[in-house]
Image: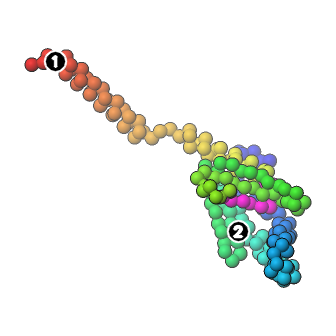
């Protein structure tokens, strides 16, 4: 693992090429369990599925920058998501039996403000050295939050607070002077 100080951003990750086979078989399973899909299985295995999984793999991109995580996927419909690091609440590492067989895993990102019907905002499958990448994301998020929390308040805030304090002192003095004056 590269220490945070040696990490150069933006960090682009690589995806495991075995993801093509996994996706081909994963979709084949759903075709197999549907009546119409059984008829489409030969077409899927003889060319369409291989073409789709190859192009899907080549269009996968993921990049960690100083402030965000960007992910891009898709063939006909391209999806690109950017999640600010300060919004990431949790990064879950999932590796079930089938994924472990293919030496793959899924990283799921939970973010602040997601709607209740959305279990996860983003899922990345097949990242090479996903545990290390997960660690980099968490470290970069902590570094960003620490940087923001250590920033000094703006000078204008201090000036405004000083002015408010002085005004309150003047009001207190006027009230005390009014109480000391005899009623006429």
- Residue closest to the eye, 63 or 32: 32
Mark number displayed over residue 132 = none
Image quadrant in which the C terminus is located? top left
Circle nearer the N terminus (1, 2): 2
Residue lying at 71% horizontally and 50% vertically, measured from the top left: 91
Image coordinates of residue 29 in percent, x first then y, are 84, 71
Residue 16 in the image: above or below residue 184: below
Question: On the image, which quarter does residue 62 sit in?
Answer: bottom right
**Stretch in magenta:** 120-130
Image coordinates of residue 180 in percent, x first then y, are 19, 16
Question: On the image, which quarter does residue 129 sit in?
Answer: bottom right
- Residue closest to the eye, 40 or 73: 40
The single residue placed furthest to the left in the displayed view is 184
Q: Determine the secondary structure under disc 1.
A: loop
17 within the magenta span = no
- Residue closest to the eye, 50 or 41: 41
Residue 10: tell me if it is visible.
no
Mark 1: few/some/many CA within 10 Å (<14, 14-19, 20+): few
Q: Which residue is mark 2?
A: 73
Residue 103 in the image: above or below residue 141: below
Q: Which residue is mark 1?
A: 181
Residue 65 in the image: above or below residue 164: below
Q: Determine the secondary structure under disc 2.
A: strand
Residue 151: tell me if it is visible.
yes
Image coordinates of residue 87 in percent, x first then y, are 61, 51
Residue lying at 24% horizontally and 24% vertically, measured from the top left: 175
């Amino acid at each position: 693992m590269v220490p945070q100080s040696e990490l150069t951003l933006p960090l682009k990750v690589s995806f495991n090429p075995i993801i093509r086979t996994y996706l081909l078989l994963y979709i084949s399973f759903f075709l197999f369990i549907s009546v119409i899909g059984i008829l489409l299985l030969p077409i899927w295995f003889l060319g369409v599925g291989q073409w789709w999984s190859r192009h899907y793999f080549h269009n996968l991109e993921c990049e960690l920058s100083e402030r965000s995580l960007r992910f891009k996927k898709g063939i006909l419909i391209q999806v690109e998501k950017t999640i600010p690091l300060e919004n990431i609440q949790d990064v879950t590492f999932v590796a079930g039996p089938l994924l472990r067989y293919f030496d793959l895993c899924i990283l799921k990102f939970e973010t602040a403000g997601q709607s209740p019907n959305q279990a996860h905002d983003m899922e990345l499958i097949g990242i090479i050295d996903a545990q290390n990448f997960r660690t980099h994301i968490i470290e970069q998020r902590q570094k960003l939050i620490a940087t923001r929390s250590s920033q000094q308040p703006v000078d204008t805030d201090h000036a405004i607070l000083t002015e408010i304090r002085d005004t309150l002192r003047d009001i207190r003095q006027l009230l005390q002077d009014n109480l000391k004056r005899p009623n006429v």
